[in-house]
Each structure stands twice: as structure tokens, then as C-alpha cells.
Image: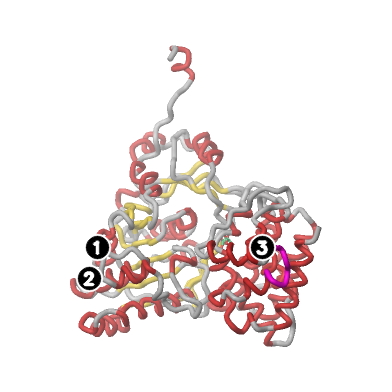
Amino acid sequence: RGGAVNDTVRVAQRLRLDTLDRLSGQGRGWVGPAVDPRALRVGVVHLGIGAFHRAHQAIFTELAAAATGREDWGITGVTQRSASVRDQLMPQDGLYSVLERGADAAPLRVVGSVRDVVFGAGDPAAVVDRIADPAVRLVTLTVTEKGYRRDGAGRLDRSDPEVVADLAGRPPRTVVGQLVRGLQRRLAESAEPITLLSCDNLVGNGDVLRGLVQDIVDALPSSEAGGLADWITTSVRFPSCMVDRIVPATTAEDRADALAVLGLEDRGVVVAEPFSQWVIEDDFAAGRPAWERAGAVLTRDVAAWEAVKLRMLNASHSLLAYLGALRGYDTIAAALTEDRLAAAAESLMVEDVAPTLRVPDGLDLDHYRGQVLTRFANPALRHRTVQVAMDGSQKLPVRLLGTVRDRLAAGAVPRHAALAVAAWMVYVAQGRDVRGRDLPLDDPMAERLGTAGAAAGGDPQRLVDALLHVDEIFGADLRDHQGFRAALVDHVAQLTKG
Ligand code: CS2
């Protein structure tokens, strides 16, 4: 290599505590951690340390520590399936930056609340150790819908080979297996109380988690199960919460932009919209960070907030993802530029969803709806339709089918919710957009869905029947509902003609 090249290509240093210290005082367009990361002690284990956690709970937790001066709520993150987050963050002393995109974006923020990252699949014993650690008083989770391994009835899927293997006593690899083995060790060692807080997009996420933990405990040999079940009842809490922030997958361009602002290379950058919301049921066994000091809402009634968010935001997100992807739009914001798609999202919320909601005190539903569409339209986010489209088999029941059931029970056929489901069916069967480009079917049930879709041979009735017969998704009630079926067939025929 020539000297001229060496002169011009300056390799940036990696983000770390010491390199960040050396930048101090030079902050232009970025802010450093709100607390001294070196002073933080770990009090939280987070399962599923993907981009969402880093752009959401990790920031609330850091700001709460800063507001109170408490140093005992640092975070150990567990990355479940791939070691990449550990490999990004550990050489950076856990530091990473959050890059907001959109109108009113705050300056780039370096976050320091994550103190340690463990690779769950590679070191399952370490996960159990961390949950048992008496200094840890809170386990939070963002493991996505499929991470809970539920069956069609919402209980633990005892036919899942990973669940079977965990129950047979190997070092646990499933999330609920990790929790139960961790609780077992904790009971044996310190019996200190602890809270398990699900932060995933599930209806009644705390109750769901409690039920799954109970299912595993019930499946243990009675010598192990008895005392554990009693201790969980007295000393473990499972509050529900609603989380909201749009956090697309990070791209090379995002990393380049962060480098330009910070002057240090950050391989753990996450991108997010400016909006962020957290509504939490205030029921903790052994304290919690003062998240209300960071803008979270602590309440006894999370259910109403959660239904509004899942049924309005997530449902219309999925509608735009499937219709948008089929119409050849790469991003949610681009999909919304087509009037028909924007109108479909709006009608879904107004006509089908709103009548099913109990509106929480202090919430203006019309304003909320407008805000959702404005957030989706943020052109700087580049949230990909195929990213939101993934795992439809897990997402549809949570975000759309509750609305469908409530409307059918009220004697109305929810046409726009049916359109979203029909668009998913066409997405599954067709696998191509209008321009002939491949659409990935990224779903734990991909094989079954793909086979069902292909067998229909392009016939709308056969496609609807084949997919409606996947009982884990639709249940026997929706499968057998003639009005719902007819609406689906109509929409599929429209979406696939010509
Ligand atoms: C999205 C959510 O990917 C998806 O399914 O609907 O991740 C959505 O962006 C968040 O729930 C927003 O809080």
C-alpha cells in the first residue's frame, strides 16, 4: 500500500470507555452516558438484547439511575441465538449509541447501562447463574412472540423439541427453561424475591409469562416442583407492560452516520424514531428502577393501554407491511404514500379496532391514531416492510384476531382486519411482489404455511381454506365462521386478480 493511501485513510478507534473519555468535552451533536458506567452494578438481567431493548428499556433504566443517583440497576444482557451482539458490545465495554431519525430527533446518545453481555446458547450455565445472583432483582424480556414457544391455546408447547430437551434436564436453551432453572437455583441459594417483566407484544404479557413458567414447573418431577411452585407464588412477580418504539434493523449507512457524528467506530449502533413509550403495571417483588423519572407510566391498569397499542399500531403496521410488500414498497413509509393503503390503515383503526377498545384515562384515541400514521410516515426511518412481515403466524393472533373475534361477536364482519389477514395469506402463497421480486417467508411455521399456500394453486377459496385450517393461528372458531371466510375469499380474489 502506498503512503498516500495511509495518509488519507484514518482508521477510527472503536467506541470504549477510555476512547469515549478522551472525547469528553468535545461533544458536538452527541451526548454521553447519563451515569458513569464504571460505577454501575448489575441488578437487571435482560433476556433478548436486540436492537429494541437497547433503544428502549436500557435508556429508561439509565435515565432512572441518573435521576435518582442509584447505581444498582446496571444490566446484563443475554443474547439468545447468535453471539453477534456480544461480539459487538463486549469489546466496547457494553457501550453503544442510539441514533434517532425523524423530525425532532435528539442528538446521538451513547448508552452505558449495559454492563455485560452473555451468549445464552453458548453459555447456558451463565444465564442460570445470573438469574440466581441475589444482587439481581429483575429479569426483563424482549424475546419476540416466537420466543415464548406457545401452542395454539397459549400454553407451553410441549411438542416443541427444544422445550422437550429443556425439560429432560439439559442446561436450558429456551427462554422459559432459563427462567425456571434460574429460579430453582435462586430458591436453593438465597431465596431472594425477584420480578420477571415481559416486554414483548403479547396480550397480558405478564400473565402469559406466569402461565408458561407454571407449565414448566408442573412438568418437573414432583420432588423439584412442590417447593418451587410455592416460592414462586410468594416471592416472584410477573407484571405486564406495554412497550412502544419503532426500531428498524441497523444498516451499514446507520453505522457510517454514527461514526461521522461520534468519531469512534460503534458496531452496536441502533436506530430509532424519536417517540418512545412504556406503560408498566406497578407490581414488583424487590424494587425497580424509578422509570417514572424517565417518562414511563406506572399504573395498575396496563390492559387497556396494551390493547390500544397492539390493535391500533401493530395491526395497522402488519396491514401496511403485507399490502405494501406485495405492492412493491420496500418501507412502511413508502407504502403509506399510496392513498389506498393509507386509507386501509385508517379504516382498520376507525371502523374495526376502535369499537373494540376501552380507552384508558387520559388518552385521546383520534390523536393517537393520527400520531401512529405520522410515525409510520417518518421517511428517515426506512423500516422495511419485510421486517414487519416476519413471524406472521405469531403476530396475527395477537394484533388482529382479537379485533376480528370481538367484531364478529358483535355481529359485524371486520372488513379491514380481514383485508390484513388476506394480505398475509397472499404474501405467504405468492412469495413475490408486483415487480416479481422474492418476498421472504421468515416464520417459525414457514414450511407448513408454504406447503399450504402452494397446494392452493392460486385459487382464492382453496388458499383461504388451507390457511384458515391452521388451528394454532385461527382456532376452530374463526376457521368455521362463514362470514369471516367469505370476506377473506373476497379480498384474496381482489389481491390476486390480474
Ligand atoms: C412491528 C413492531 O415488527 C413489527 O411487527 O409492528 O416491532 C413495532 O415496530 C413495535 O411494536 C413498535 O413499538
User: 190 or 129: nearer the eye?
Assistant: 129
Quick one: SS at disc 3?
helix
Quick one: SS at disc 2?
helix
Q: Name the residue located 36 percent from the left edge and 80 percent from the top edge.
A: 214
Q: Which mark is residue 129?
A: 1
Q: Are marks 1 and 2 in contact (CB under 8 Å)?
A: yes
The residue identified by callout 3 is 372
Q: Residues within 10 Å of mark 1 (few under 14, many from 20)?
A: some
Nearest to the eye among marks 3 and 1: give it. Answer: 1
Tag 3: amino acid: Val
User: 395 or 379: nearer the eye?
Assistant: 395
Question: Looking at the image, can residue 46 be seen?
Answer: yes
Stretch in magenta: 457-463
324 to 437, vertically: above or below: below
Question: Looking at the image, can residue 362 be seen?
Answer: no
Nearest to the eye among marks 3 and 2: give it. Answer: 2
Quadrant of the image where one finds ligand 1: bottom right
Please provide percent x and percent y for residue 97. 46, 45
Q: Answer whether residue 242 is magenta in the image.
A: no
Tag 1: amino acid: Asp
Could you tell which of marks 3 and 2 lies nearer the N-terminus? Answer: 2
